[in-house]
Amino acid sequence: MKIIQITDLHIDDEEAYPFDIDVRKNLLRILTYIEKYKPDHLVVSGDLCYRDPKPEIMQWVKEVLDFSGLEYSVIAGNHDDSEMMAEVFQIKHLLNEEELYFAKRIGKETVLFLDTARGFLSAKQSNWLKRQLKNAGSDVLIFMHHPPVKAGVAFMDNRYPMQYLDKVQQIFFDQPANVHVFCGHYHVEKTIRLKNLTVQITPSCFFQIDQQSPEFKVDHHRIAFREIVMDNQIMFSTVRYFNGSKK
Ligand SMILES: [Fe+2]
């Protein structure tokens, strides 16, 4: 079973080039590579929109993803709006109040998709997560936008970490399964392990952030996707980089 994850697209208005980057071309380019890998599923793990959530931007992303012919799931990041996403992607049945979280069967795995658009999990979503984890097998795959750990990335850890980290981590620690979280938000490539929790941060399709600098600093402009293959209880996780498009 093969899943490909892309994250932090930060698509801007037509003819807009944030940081002189052609973010629309970046998405189109990376999708042409992804199609060759023939994944069973593509996950877009949040921050579809550049700064403010806009339905016309989400609509453009939806059309591009639909055109790829890939099966895919989208979740919201802090620059998205979950209700808007549910409306545009026609998945309103997956909305729980204003959050968009759900479980999906992909191959032999039940994969969980969380909503951290507001920077935290509501009590309702936390209870849903606990119930899902209770029924899970020995390994659980979870996609969410925010890393549920501090990641040793000074700028992001200080300014934009997920809220109530202790609480969300405790949900994972309280059950015996190995929890594999795939996320984005930080614009870096990184793996963090804490008890039964392994967090893999996937680089952005926009630019990557310097991991040492306490101030905002771009590290480089290569973009990437993550390929996750589950094969007889072995998991392969590979990040592949491509040149990004400057204006
Ligand atoms: Fe983000």
Image: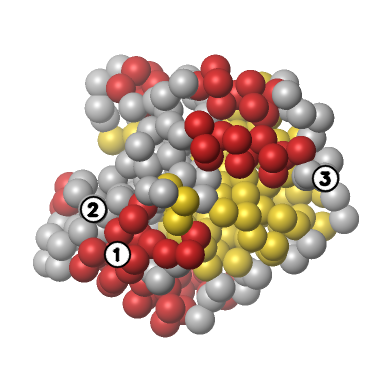
Density class for disc 2 (Cα within 10 Å; few <14, some 14-19, many ≥20) is many
**Mark 3 highlights which residue?**
137
Q: Are marks 1 and 2 in contact (CB under 8 Å)?
A: yes
Q: Are marks 1 and 3 in contact (CB under 8 Å)?
A: no
Q: Are marks 2 and 3 in contact (CB under 8 Å)?
A: no
CA–CA distance in space, label 2 to label 3:
36 Å
CA–CA distance in space, label 1 to label 2:
8 Å
Residue 185 sits in which quadrant?
top left
Query: In screen coordinates, is 201 left or right of 221?
Result: right
- Residue in the picture at 57% in, 54% down: 102
Query: In screen coordinates, is 170 left or right of 155?
Result: right
**Element type at marker 2?**
loop
N-term mark: 2 or 3 = 2
Q: Amino acid at mark 1?
A: Met
Q: How many marks?
A: 3
Asked if residue 225 can be seen in this view, the reply is: no
N-term mark: 1 or 3 = 1
CA–CA distance in space, label 1 to label 3:
34 Å
Asked if residue 69 can be seen in this view, the reply is: yes
Q: Nearer the viewer, residue 207 or 77?
A: 77
Q: Nearer the viewer, residue 237 or 147?
A: 147
